[in-house]
Amino acid sequence: MEANMKPLDERPEGSPEVTNEFVIQDVSGWVLRIGVAVSVAVMILGLALSFARHPPKVKFMESTRFQANPAMIWHGVIHGHGVEIIELGIFLLVLTPIMRVAMSVILFAFYDHDWLYTLVTLGVLLLTLASLLFLR
């Protein structure tokens, strides 16, 4: 526990309990951990497939760019192309903090019933999604 946090039984009478805060922090932490672990696993799988099927040449690696088109990436993933699987892992890594914010919106609204935090977090989520979609 932090130095300024007192256990619930030592708090002054009438002070609010903060158990919901800890639940939201725990869920947010797990979303980040799982998202990073899955994205790293996908990237390692793509790297292994890429080296096993098509050993890359230096010129190819210097000229290859990230595919920003999800349809092209998905097409490559379905066909087992290592580079597109790596790009899928990168997309998952970028989406991980966005999923954390989305989960926070849900938890603030339905678990904590804190409508101010719900609206602020929803605004952050919408601004983040808008910047990803429209500011290329």
Image: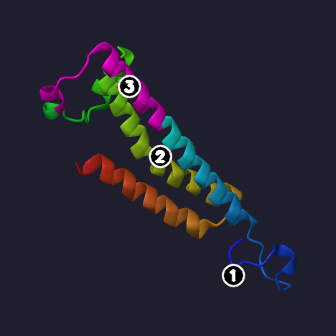
Q: Which amino acid does label 1 sit on?
A: Asn
Q: Which mark is residue 96?
A: 2
Residue kind at label 2, given as amino acid type: Thr
Alpha carbons under labels 1 and 3: distance apart: 46 Å
**At numbered mark 2, what does the secondary structure look like: helix, strand or loop?**
helix
* Element marked by disc 1: loop
> In the rendered structure, which amino acid carries the disc numbered 3?
Gly
Which numbered mark, 1 or 2, is in the foreground of this view?
1
Tag on residue 4? 1
Seen at 12% across and 28% down, the residue is 59
Q: Which residue is pictured at 75% across the width and 65% down the height?
A: 19
Residue 33 screen position, x and y as percent: 56, 46
Residue placed most toward the observer, 102 or 85: 85
C-alpha span from label 3 to label 2 = 19 Å
Q: Is residue 77 magenta?
A: no
Secondary element at tag 3: helix
Closer to the chain start, of discs 1 and 3, is: 1
Q: Position of residue 29 (x, y in %)?
A: 59, 53
**Magenta region, main secondary structure:** helix
Give the magenta part as a residue range.
Answer: 39-61
